[in-house]
Image (spheres, grey):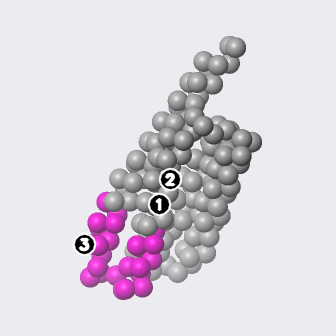
């Protein structure tokens, strides 16, 4: 029974992490989306603007997902949800971040980094599936 308060505290910290990380990511995603739409339209080629917009889109999708996962956490297995949060945050940083830098710098080799972010996102979603299955 002594583990119950500790588990409750850890769950609360994990909920705050997921919702907080999602909110920060959403804030940055909205700001970057506005920057792309208004500040980059005349500076980037249409192809590079599309790359930038894909980064924003995936960042915003996963920002909302993190908030939703934080809200759902009390109903799911916490251990895989912790990994889901870590992997979704890391995946967003690598996936969207590499697309932002690629679009702004034109360094095509960064396209080779992007799939690693995608793999982290996929692994994060696999953790959510595991958590939902009660593992």
Point out the stretch of residues depicted in magenta.
31-55
Secondary element type, mark 1: helix
Residue where numbered disc 2 is placed: 65
Q: Nearer the viewer, residue 118 or 73?
A: 73
Quarter of the N terminus within the rendering: top right
Alpha-carbon distance for marks 2 and 1?
A: 6 Å
* Disc ID at residue 31: none
Q: Residues within 10 Å of mark 2 (few under 14, many from 20)?
A: some
Residue where numbered disc 3 is placed: 38
Residue 73 position within the rendered picture, expressed as x and y whole percent measured from the top left: 57, 39
Residue located at (29% from left, 66% from top): 34
Secondary element type, mark 2: helix
Q: Nearer the viewer, residue 40 or 29?
A: 29
Quarter of the C terminus within the rendering: top right
Residue 78 in sight = yes
Alpha-carbon distance for marks 2 and 3?
A: 26 Å
Residue where numbered disc 1 is placed: 61
- Relative to 135, say whether 64 is above or below: below
Residue 127 in sight = no
């Amino acid at each position: 029974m002594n583990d119950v308060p500790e588990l409750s505290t850890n769950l609360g910290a994990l909920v705050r992490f997921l919702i907080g990380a999602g909110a920060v990511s959403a804030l940055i995603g909205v700001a970057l989306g506005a920057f792309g739409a208004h500040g980059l339209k005349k500076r980037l080629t249409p192809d590079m603007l599309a790359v930038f917009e894909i980064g924003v889109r995936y960042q915003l999708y996963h920002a909302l997902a993190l908030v939703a996962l934080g809200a759902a956490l009390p109903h799911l297995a916490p251990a895989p949800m912790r990994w889901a949060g870590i992997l979704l945050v890391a995946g967003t940083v690598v996936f969207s971040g590499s697309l932002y830098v690629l679009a702004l710098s034109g360094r095509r080799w960064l396209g080779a980094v992007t799939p690693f972010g995608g793999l982290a996102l996929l692994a994060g979603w696999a953790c959510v599936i595991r958590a939902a299955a009660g593992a």
